[in-house]
Image: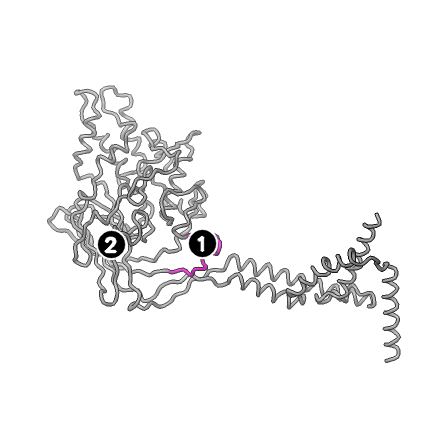
Amino acid sequence: MSLLLRVGRTFYRILVDYCNNASLAGIGYIFNRRYHASERLFWAVCTLTAWVFAVQLIRSYMELFRNDTISIAVENIDTRTEPIVFPAVGVCELGYVKQQYPRLEAYINNLQENEQQEYNYDVEDFLLRVIFPNLYNVGSMSNFCVMYEECDDCMKCPKDGHKKAAAMVRTNCSELFQECRWNDQPFDCCRYFQPIETTMGSCFLLNSIQTVQKHGDRWLPLQMDSENPDGDLLLVYNRAVSTNVMNEDDIPHILLSRLQFAQVSPGYEEKIYITLQNIVNDPLVRSVDVDVRRCLFPDERYLPFGNTSFPRYSYSVCVTECLKSIQLRSPHRDRLCACIITNYHLSLRFGKPYKGHDNDSVCGLAGLQCLDQSELIAPPTRILQPWYTGGYPCRCYPSCTENEIRMVGRHSYFNDGNERSVKLKLMIHPTQRYRRQIVRENIDVVVSIGGILGLFTGASVLSIVEFFYFFTVRFISYTVVTHEVVPIAESVQESSDDEHEERNVYTEIF
């Protein structure tokens, strides 16, 4: 009991001693009993006001630091030392109703249960829309099949096996491409265009980090500089296709059609002129929270609705995985569709098949009809907006390495041939680029908060040391080392004597 009383007295003495000698502005005047109560009240109001202003300024600065740390500036490029890299290109096969598909016809003939069943063109139209997403329209998954469900002698739409049918009907690389040229120099199309499954169906990507290792043996060097300024990419096709100009981490997507160019009819030739403006990131950008910088780097693959099966992150990958998640979880008439369309099921990682989530399942006929009735096979583009309130918003950040690609011209004409062709040309070498940089670093936070506290309260790093010194070193010294603690009454008496002496001095002076 005596020990607790002794510790309590010591703590009170240390507290009084600290308040009388603290370096924080105003505190010494508040707790010093030598001053009149009105003076102490005046300093208490001033000190409290200063601390309130300091706290408010610090809160405002921290809010600004969290939400306005990144800026994007424009800087010049020295084209003599920094080469310009041509964008990635994606080529996706499109369905063409005027084209015959012998392998599809053979697949449908195998669906005949007996010789009396006739070839069903509605089944063909149904399968074309399953295999080629560009032919899909809302309601087609039911309109072509419902009328034959109760017919015993009619060929019915297959309830499953759509993945097998798609693999059989779609063309491979050698069948799709006829010729590829870079600045009039031919190159092996199928060596550098690597396959991938997307919402557009079967696609082939050139210089995409989603399918090949960057600068590896299947990466085509498409660089331009002041000595080699030309940047012409000529692609000749045997089938109807969609040509996509993309960033190296992007994939073609059915809802992202700004830089998609369709070459459908035979004999169709097209020239597309583009410009490019790059973006670079300062190394410290990675240290900023994602919600502040509002972008993700390709190696940051975490998504709010589940990890992606693609090897790199991009906005188009995020949208693809978001729609995939929506299809798996979307309710319709009190039940879950719980499946994904054929084109989502398999993606390729560096040219090798890679299975996505374990609970993924390809839709059969009933699942496709469920998604079709829910309008989730090719949903409206407003679903991509973060403020969309329809129940399935895709909150996807852009890629931090996403360059700005613009189309500045487009010319098309027809010839008498059967092939289709497109020439992509980079018109002007960029002389400027964007730089994402940090405006405020962690050291700026320390300096700013220290300046605010020093201006309003007189605090510094030594003030913190002083506080811990009084309540640790001196406290231990008074309680453990010193055996005799001066009673509080004696301390008060000494303070009163000092005050009396000070008043006598003031009397003598005046």
Look at the image and name its color scheme: one colour
Q: Amino acid at mark 1?
A: Arg
- Percent x, y of residue 406: 30, 58
Give yes or no for residue 279 being in the magenta stretch. no
Q: Quadrant of residue 156?
A: top left
Q: Residues within 10 Å of mark 1 (few under 14, many from 20)?
A: some
- Residue appearing at x 40%, y 44% in the figure: 383
Q: Nearer the viewer, residue 26 or 312?
A: 312
Was residue 288 drawn as part of the magenta stretch in this picture? Answer: yes
The region drawn magenta spans 280-296
Comparing 18 with 172, the one in front is 18
Q: Residue at x 38, y 51 (%)?
A: 298
Residue picked out by circle 1: 294
Query: Left of 4 or right of it: where is 226?
Result: left
Q: According to the image, label 2 marks what residue?
A: 220
User: Residue 144 at what x, y percent from top left?
Assistant: 27, 30
